[in-house]
Amino acid sequence: MRVLFVTHSFPRFGGDAAGSFLLRLAAALSGENVQVRVLAPAAPGLERVAVMSGIEVRRFRYAPRSHETLAYRGTMAEDVSRSYVAKAALGSFIISQTGSLLSQARQWKPHIIHAHWWFPNGIAAATVSRLTGTPLITTSHGTDLRLLQKTPAARPLARYVFGRSSAVTCVSEWLAQQAAPLCRSVPVVAPMPVDVSIFTPRGDRDSNRMVFVGRLSAQKGIEDAIRALALMSRCTILEVVGDGPDKARLVALADSLGLSHRILWRGQVAHDALPAILSRASALVAPFIEEGLGLVAAEAQLCETPPVAYASGGLTDVVQNDSTGTLVAPHDIAALAAALDRMIGDTGHRARIGRAGRAAALARFSPAATAGRYAGIYHDVTSH
């Protein structure tokens, strides 16, 4: 079976974190007798055609090189909202993606077009599906549905994409509930895979270190993590991995709370450096709000590093409270601090949660498990 992935996020080079779960899924699908080709946007320094982990990747041009910056950085929505140049680039992106996808569909003749994120990729995919008759599957990863909260006028467009889709998948139960009113049939919950080969326990854990991994923005809750650190009874180090628009304000907040000596600002790191960071910590603090899934929590679980998270969004799919991690009410900073104190201070509790979390993550998020799930969806779609 031939499946054509359409995406705006996919690894540009070995170790690149952008869309890395899509490469893992594509590679694992080969074990299910599914051949994947990927259509992704161009970016400076990338070849138009490349092979990564046995997967052919084709990049489409959509603007002059200096303006091909919409993809891969995780800032597309912000860039488009504040820049007329980015708005023009987005229009060109969708037109160019549609033309390239139509060419690939006619040349390669895939059995299925699989669009990742209904926006922007689902728009081109729905159009090409209608023109060629190729069945469409659309997967929501979270940021695309969050867009509808900020831009309700886009709901008819989302309804068109989902309505054109033979199946809609969502990476968490929470997302499936959000998408359901826009779909013809009930969305299928099918998460993305985690690299189980590198996310493993390493035995060098620091009993007074916790880690935050994510974009430094309000949605990721990093401010709550800092304020929780100030309330904790244990003198714990917080290692912050990631960057974002709020960093200067967050550094100033840490200074004002007298926490500068207890926070390590690591910035962005290569994806293959993350396992060592997670394995060294005694807890992952994940106060994310309405996260689509929260794969970093599953990555931490694979390292036997228990997540302490907000009971919000897709994190409730990943973390079972007091079994594979700890969940507290969103924005309850005192409860977050208390849960972190217990997780870090009670070594027996932490070890039990860590072992259970790893077993659960292996069962649900391994590439083999997720590829089997998607292969089944593909066969269901093509058999009707």
Image (cartoon, helix red, strand yellow):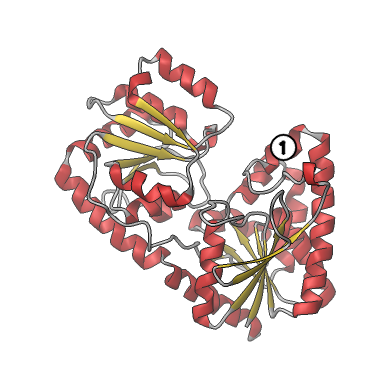
Q: Residue at x 72, y 65 (%)?
A: 163
The amino acid beneath tag 1 is Asp
Residue 232 placement, left or right of 329: left
Taking the spot 77% from the left edge, 54% from the top edge, the residue there is 157
* Quadrant position of residue 11: bottom right
- The residue identified by callout 1 is 79
The foreground one among 240 and 169 is: 240
Residue 125 sits above or below residue 238 on the image: below
Q: How many marks?
A: 1
Is residue 189 something that shows in the picture?
Answer: no
Spot occupied by residue 281 in the image (x, y as percentages of width and height): 30, 41
Task: Residue 176: give x, y in percent of width and height.
Answer: 55, 58
> Would you place residue 302 above or below residue 341 in this image?
below
Tell me if mark 1 has few (under 14), some (14-19) or many (20+) residues whose alpha carbon lies within 10 angstroms of its own. Answer: some
At horizontal 32% and vertical 37% (from top left) the residue drawn is 210
State the residue lying farthest toward the left.
Answer: 348
Q: Quadrant of the C terminus?
A: bottom right
**Can you give x and y, in whole percent of width and height, for residue 86 in the image?**
79, 40
Q: Is residue 229 above or below residue 103?
A: above
